[in-house]
Image: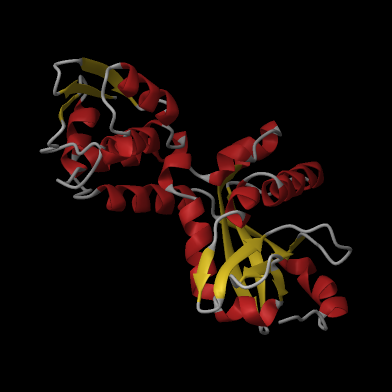
Amino acid sequence: MIKVKITGKAGTALEQELPTDIHQLYHDIREAGISKPPKNILLHEDKDVDVKLSSDSEIGNRLLRVFSKNDTLADANTVAFAVSTAREEILTELEQNIVHSQYPTKEMLFDDIKTMTQAAGPIKLTFYCPLVGQLDDGEYDEYIDVGSGFLTAYQDQIEQGIADEQAPEIGDMAQYLGDDPGVADKLMSAVWTVEDIDGKLLGRIDCHLKEPLTAEEMADLREEILGQCSDGLGEGFEQRPIDTDEGDLYVSYWNSSDDYFLCTEDELDEYLEPHQGMGGM
């Protein structure tokens, strides 16, 4: 889609087709004698390397216009990845928008891909789960367990943190939930976020579907989401500190207690009722 030629000060050059695996790109750049990682290589006027972008396609050439002077090689790879992995259901409209220069910036491109993908799944299915928080206040060797009231006070920061974890370079989380062919075909988008319900901050997973799921597909999707909460997206997120006035906060979408649940919006009342007393710091 996009071709890049990177030339270092010593004259060594690397030619690569984007998108590619970002870790492989970093390795290839180092093999070419260039020490800068892709996220630090500017597409325009980099003082250490010369970067030339090109494309053999109209779509690719139009995409080159979305990059600003501050965008990097990693950004170019992400843009190429986002377009090349766009769902078939939105591809024609997306390509027409690119051809007609509808995206002055990469951020507008990413936002529109997200909006169109979710619109292509008009059926919304929402799951909820409890959140667990631990605070490192810098004074004790062990983390302090914090309750929902503490988490609610930092809802904006937690929401931004989980949004950052779902950055454009990883694509929509729906692609990681499609072991079942029926789910893979019907599920257009899946987004992890949080919601304050009656003073309790819960994890929320919004799924956008083209068609209703069968009972078996629903069970498979629930299991896949649970896996992401415990070992996938959620595992990565819980290791990233969220800055608060009282120290570093770590938030998990999964825990091993008997109080844990992953339920749909329709099931939520029956899960919240027995746990209204759940509190903490």
Residue positioned 24% across, 30% down in the render: 59
**Vertically, is 124 above or below 7?**
below
Q: Is residue 217 left or right of residue 10?
A: right
**Vertically, is 271 above or below 94?**
below
Q: Quadrant of the N terminus?
A: top left
Q: Give coordinates of residue 80: x percent, y percent.
A: 33, 33
For the residue pair 107 and 25, the one nearer the viewer reads as: 25
Colouring used for the render = secondary structure
Q: Give coordinates of residue 111: x percent, y percent.
A: 36, 53
Q: Is residue 231 left or right of residue 158?
A: right
Q: Give coordinates of residue 140: x percent, y percent.
A: 67, 70
Q: Is residue 49 left or right of residue 155?
A: left
Q: Quadrant of the C terminus?
A: bottom right
Residue 74 visible in the displayed image:
no
Residue 180 visible in the displayed image:
yes
Q: Is residue 69 left or right of residue 255?
A: left
For the residue pair 26 and 211, the one nearer the viewer reads as: 26
Residue positioned 20% across, 23% down in the render: 6
For the residue pair 209 and 191, the one nearer the viewer reads as: 191
Q: Give coordinates of residue 85: x percent, y percent.
A: 43, 33
**Vertically, is 174 above or below 126?**
above
Res 251 quadrant in image: bottom right
**Vertically, is 223 above or below 181?**
below
Residue positioned 72% across, 45% down in the render: 227
Res 75 quadrant in image: top left
Number of numbered tags placed on the structure image: 0
